[in-house]
Amino acid sequence: MTATILDGKRIARDVRHDLALLAQDHEQRHGHPAGLAIVRAGDDPASAVYTQSLQRAAQKIGVVATALALPADVDDDGLRSCLEALNADDSVQGILTQLPLPPHLSPATIAQTIDPRKDVDGISLRSAGNLFLKLPSFVPSTCAAVLEILDRCQIPLVSRRAVVVGASNVVGKPLSFLLLHRDATVTTCHIYTRDLAAWTLQADVLVVAAGKAGLITGAMVKPGAVVIDVGINVRDDGSITGDVDFASVVEVAGAITPVPGGVGQLTNLMLLKQTLLARDLWSA
């Protein structure tokens, strides 16, 4: 068996087209384009590259993405003041604060300060609580990207066994709840799970977001399973690889996302999608 490749690039093209139409509708209904504020603290080069990438993606579909660069020595009060100003700005539908923050800043400042109605990456206390309670909520963009791939590829979840490897606050935990809300039977594992293969071999849908290159091999995958690789790891030669050993798993799985070219193609777009849907989410 050779798995079907779930091509993130192709899916992203379709999503981009749909979002451009959604952006046009937003501007017609509200009289101005949707606005996303991107807040970053310090001068981390990777963070700057990500900001530029997100701004390019926003421009292509008709969302105004504005970057606010705070100095590296900004304190929690300064970060809080910035977020409060954006909370009060009617031209801003979504706020993204890039992580990780400089070590002297507390992530709790963001979670406690950001207006939940603008928390388009789903990190506020209200977003997390609403997700737990199955209420309308923003969700982390990577989780939204995983669901977008599953939906657009018409992969059923009801009554299927889903295993999530990874328990982070931004992928593993929220994704487990999202799959549970779709009536899958969900098991959450991590890199310290004893006899990990015993669990992954049960999965009809296996999502891997553990941050460890090559963690999942073909011997750990149920024949015909759908495998979603969320991992992004940089090799010594600078190339990118996932958490799944693609070469061995592609011979066993029924479908698989590549790295690169899979989930990562959609994360920015999901952030923009939630920005476009922000007002409708909270007025429903």
Image (cartoon, helix red, strand yellow):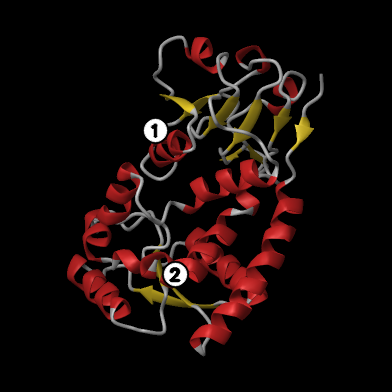
Residue 77 coordinates in the image, percent (x, y): 18, 70
Quarter of the picture holding the N terminus: top right
Distance of label 2 from label 1 (alpha carbons): 30 Å
Q: Which mark is residue 167?
A: 1
The answer to whether 226 is drawn above or below residue 81 in the figure is: above
Of all residues, the one furthest to the front in this rendering is: 284
The answer to whether 212 is drawn above or below residue 85 in the figure is: above
The residue at 43%/38% (across/down) is 181
Q: Which label lies toward us, 2 or 1? A: 2
Residue 225 coordinates in the image, percent (x, y): 66, 23
Disc 1 packing (10 Å; few <14; some 14–19; many ≥20): some
Residue 38 coordinates in the image, percent (x, y): 44, 71
Q: Is residue 42 visible?
A: no
Quarter of the picture holding the C terminus: bottom left
Q: Is residue 217 left or right of residue 144?
A: right
The answer to whether 164 is drawn above or below residue 133 in the figure is: above
> Is label 1 in a helix, a strand or a loop?
loop
Q: Which mark is residue 280?
A: 2
Q: Which mark is residue 97?
A: none
Q: Quadrant of residue 85?
A: bottom left
Q: Amino acid at mark 2?
A: Asp
| Of the image marks 2 and 1, the number of the one nearer the N terminus | 1
Residue 236 coordinates in the image, percent (x, y): 62, 37
Q: Quadrant of residue 110?
A: bottom left
The residue at 73%/18% (across/down) is 252
